[in-house]
């Protein structure tokens, strides 16, 4: 099957309360690969970790089949995890890591892979769907019924993730996949965006035709609402 036509754009901003941008994003349309990474670890930690992750994906050769592409992405993530751990060890064992969300497209299908609380959304036929499920303490408590949606918004440990690259010797990715449909619109973003923008905001933005306008609009809205963290977004639209 011929490759679908996807138009994409990305943007990032340090936000209004941080001194350093620890987010990174990757646009590789020729490889059918897009990714957002949100680093953690402070000065010379989180920014390095997120960059290691996106650079590992950026160095992949373009595979000829969907299965080969998926396997290559998984290998790159394993290598990035090992490289972040090694870098942290050289810094005396300082804690550092990064979340990661990636979208992989091949032959009329897509796969979404993630680790942590950076998210992926799909707008299809006017309906918004969150493809990823946060790997976070807050999400675990919501799933168990300990917190409701209102309580979760103000829970003090809402930003604590349960999975990330560079934290443990092994890294585990979750994956969802589906066929692409003309008109599908995707958003990949760091939690700096979803802390301030809800589903209605995201759906309204993704309904716009231009991916760059989607990213710029959502980041502008995040800044308007206080931008307590770094914020990054990639928007994609399937046109064939």
Image (spheres, helix red, strand yellow):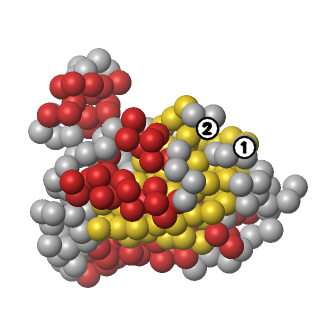
Tell me, for residue 52, which label it has, or none: none
Q: Secondary structure at mark 2?
A: strand
Residue 1 seen by the camera: yes
- Quadrant position of residue 228: bottom left
- Could you tell me how far apart the alpha carbons at marks 2 and 1 are, in whole angstroms? 8 Å
* Image quadrant in which the N terminus is located: bottom right
Q: Which residue is mark 2?
A: 124
Q: Residue at x 27, y 53 (%)?
A: 222
Residue 58 lies left or right of residue 226; in this view the side is right
Give the percent coordinates (x, y) of residue 2: 85, 59
Q: Secondary structure at mark 1?
A: loop
Give the percent coordinates (x, y) of residue 151: 18, 25
* Image quadrant in which the C terminus is located: bottom right
- The answer to which of 19 and 212 lies nearer the viewer is 212
Q: Are marks 2 and 1 in contact (CB under 8 Å)?
A: yes
Residue 112 seen by the camera: no
State whether residue 68 is above or below residue 90: above
- The answer to which of 78 and 219 lies nearer the viewer is 219
Tell me, for residue 181, which label it has, or none: 1
Residue 219 lies left or right of residue 52; in this view the side is left
Q: Residue at x 17, y 69 (%)?
A: 42
Q: Residue at x 57, y 54 (%)?
A: 209
Label whose residue precedes the other's in the sequence (2 or 1): 2
For label 2, the crowd category at 10 Å Cα-Cα, with few meaning under 14, some 14 to 19 and many 20 or more, is some
State whether residue 4 is above or below residue 53: above
State whether residue 226 is above or below residue 230: above
- Quadrant position of residue 21: bottom left
Give the percent coordinates (x, y) of residue 103: 57, 56
Give the percent coordinates (x, y) of residue 69: 69, 63
Looking at the image, which residue sits at the far top?
A: 145
């Amino acid at each position: 099957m011929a490759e679908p036509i996807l138009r994409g754009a990305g943007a990032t901003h340090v936000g209004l309360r941080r001194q350093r941008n620890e987010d990174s994003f990757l646009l590789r349309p020729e490889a059918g690969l897009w990714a957002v990474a949100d680093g953690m670890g402070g000065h010379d930690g989180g920014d390095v970790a997120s960059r290691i992750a996106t650079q590992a994906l950026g160095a992949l050769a373009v595979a000829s089949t969907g299965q080969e592409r998926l396997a290559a992405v998984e290998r790159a993530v394993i290598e990035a995890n090992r490289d972040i751990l090694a870098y942290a060890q050289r810094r005396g064992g300082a804690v550092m890591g990064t979340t990661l969300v990636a979208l992989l497209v091949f032959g009329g299908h897509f796969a979404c892979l993630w680790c942590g609380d950076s998210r992926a959304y799909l707008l299809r036929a006017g309906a918004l769907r969150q493809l990823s499920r946060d790997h976070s303490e807050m999400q675990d408590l919501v799933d168990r019924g300990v917190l409701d949606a209102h309580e979760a918004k103000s829970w003090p440990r809402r930003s604590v993730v349960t999975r990330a690259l560079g934290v443990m010797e092994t890294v585990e990715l979750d994956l969802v996949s589906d066929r692409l449909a003309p008109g599908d619109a995707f958003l990949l973003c760091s939690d700096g965006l979803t802390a301030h923008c809800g589903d209605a905001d995201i759906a309204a933005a993704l309904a716009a035709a231009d991916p760059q306008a989607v990213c710029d609009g959502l980041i502008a809205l995040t800044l308007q609402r206080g931008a307590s963290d770094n914020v990054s977004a990639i928007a994609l639209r399937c046109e064939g």
